[in-house]
Amino acid sequence: MKLDITTHMNSFLDSKVVEKYQKRKNEVYQQLDQAYMNGWLHPDLSYVDDIIRVRDKVLKHSQCLVVVGIGGSFLGCCAFYEMFTPYFKNNHFPIIFAGTTLSSRYMKELLEYLETVDFSLNVISKSGTTMETSLTYSAIKRVMEKKYSKEELKDHIIITTDPVKGTLREEINCEGYESFEIPDNIGGRYSLLTAAHLFPLSFCIDINELIEGYQEGIQKREDAYSYAAVRRSLFDQGKVVENFISYENNWYYYLEWLKQLFGETEGKEGKGILPISMIHTRDLHSLGQFIQEGNKIVFETFFKIRHMSDCVIDGKDLHQMNRVVEDSVITAHVSGGVPCITIELDEVTPKTIGEVSSFYFLVAAFSGFLFDIDPFNQPGVEVYKKEVKTRLKDI
Ligand code: PA5
C-alpha cells in the first residue's frame, strides 16, 4: 500500500501545526506501547488450527453459517465477506449476518428461513451482555433447539467471547459448545486478528493471507503516525469531517468498518473527527455537491486500486475509466477547497486489505492519543443502553 499525504495537501496544511503534532511522536508511541488494550499489536495466533478444525466440521453438516454480533466485534467479518465473495455467482458458502437490528419484520423472516435450512451459529460478543446480540442469539437458539438434539447443538453452536467471564463463557462451560476467545487486552473494534473475525472469515478467504498482510501493516508506524498527525492538524484548521471514499461497490461494509473504528475511538469529550463515507461514482450524484461547494469542513481519503478485473466496454477499459474519473474528482475537490489523502493498492486481496486494516488500527490509536482521549473505550455507548434498560421494564 502507498500512502500519499502530500500531493493534494500541501496548500491546505499549516506546517507549524503539523510540526506541533509531529513533535509528540515519541510520547504517543510510548502511550501505545504502555496501553493495556494494545494486544492487537502482537496478536496470539495459536488458535488458528482450531479455527480450521471447527470450520471443516461446520462445512460437513451445515448449508450456511449465521454470525450474530454487532459493532466492532464483527463488522470486519461483514466487510471482508462482502469484498471477497462474488457479486452474483452463488458458488460460495453463505454467511448470514444478524444481530444488528430489533426489526420485528427482519427477525420474523430470518427465523422462518432458518427453520428451513441446516445451519450453524457463531455468536460473537466479548461482554456477552450486548442487548441486540443476546436477543438474536436466544431467538435463533430456540429454532435450533427444535431442530437439533442437545448433543448435535454442541456441533452447531460456536461461541466467541471473553476467555473467563460473562454469561456466554458460563454457557460454554455448562453446555460444552465449541468456543473461541477474544483476549482481555483487545477491544471489539481492534479484534480483526482474533477468532471473532478469523473464524467466520475462514469460510470465505484464506485467513493466512489476511494474517500476513496484517503483520506487514502493523509495522507501518511512521506512515500511520504521519497520517494521524496530518488529520489532527487538518482538524485544528477546521476540517472536522473525514470522508472515506471507494470506487468499488463491494467496499460498502469496509467503509462502515472504518467509520465504526474511528467513531468509537475518537468521538469523546467533545472531540474527534467525524468519519463519513461515500461510494463513487454513485454518491457523486448526492453528497458530491456538498463536498464540492458546501461547508468546507471536510477532508477526504481515497482508496485507489491499480488493478481490477478486465472489462472492456465500447473499446474502453472500464477500470482505467474509473481511475480517470477518480483522479478528475480529486482535482475537482482540491480546487473546491477539500484536502485529499490517497491510499493506493496494487490489487484487492485479503493480504492487501489485511495490511490496510492493521495500518488503520495504528492511525486510529495514534489519532486518539493526539486528541488526548482513551482510544480504547466507548463510554458514550452506555448512555443509551442505560436509558433503554429503564424503559424496557415497562413493556
Ligand atoms: O468496538 C467495540 O468495542 C464495540 O463496538 C463492541 O464491539 C460492540 O459494542 C459489541 O460489544 P460486545 O462484543 O461486548 O458484544
Image (cartoon, rainbow, N blue to C red):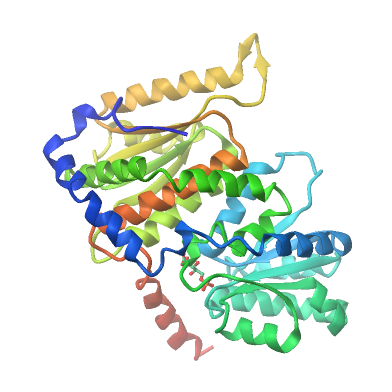
What residue is shown at x 56% (from left), y 34% (from top)?
248
Q: List x then y, in percent, for residue 337.
A: 24, 30
What residue is shown at x 24% (from left), y 52% (from top)?
26
Residue 71 showing in the rendered view: no
Where does the C terminus fall, quadrant-wise? bottom right
Q: In this view, does 208 lie to the left or right of 371?
A: right
What residue is shown at x 69% (from left), y 68% (from top)?
122
Q: In which quarter of the image is residue 38?
A: bottom left
What residue is shown at x 37% (from left), y 77% (from top)?
383
Q: In this view, does 188 lie above or below 90?
A: below
Q: How many labels does the image show?
A: 0
Q: List x then y, in percent, for residue 296.
A: 24, 38
Q: Quadrant of residue 343?
A: top left
Q: Is residue 342 above or below residue 46?
A: above
Q: List x then y, in percent, for residue 19.
A: 16, 41
| Direction top: furthest residue | 315
Q: Which sits in the foreground, 38 or 285? A: 38
Q: Which sits in the foreground, 113 or 14? A: 14
Q: In which quarter of the image is residue 193?
A: bottom right
Q: Is residue 299 left or right of residue 233?
A: right
Residue 40 showing in the rendered view: yes
Q: Which sits in the foreground, 345 or 84? A: 345
Q: Is residue 350 above or below residue 369?
A: above
Q: List x then y, in percent, for residue 291.
A: 33, 35
Q: In this view, does 157 lie above or below 329?
A: below
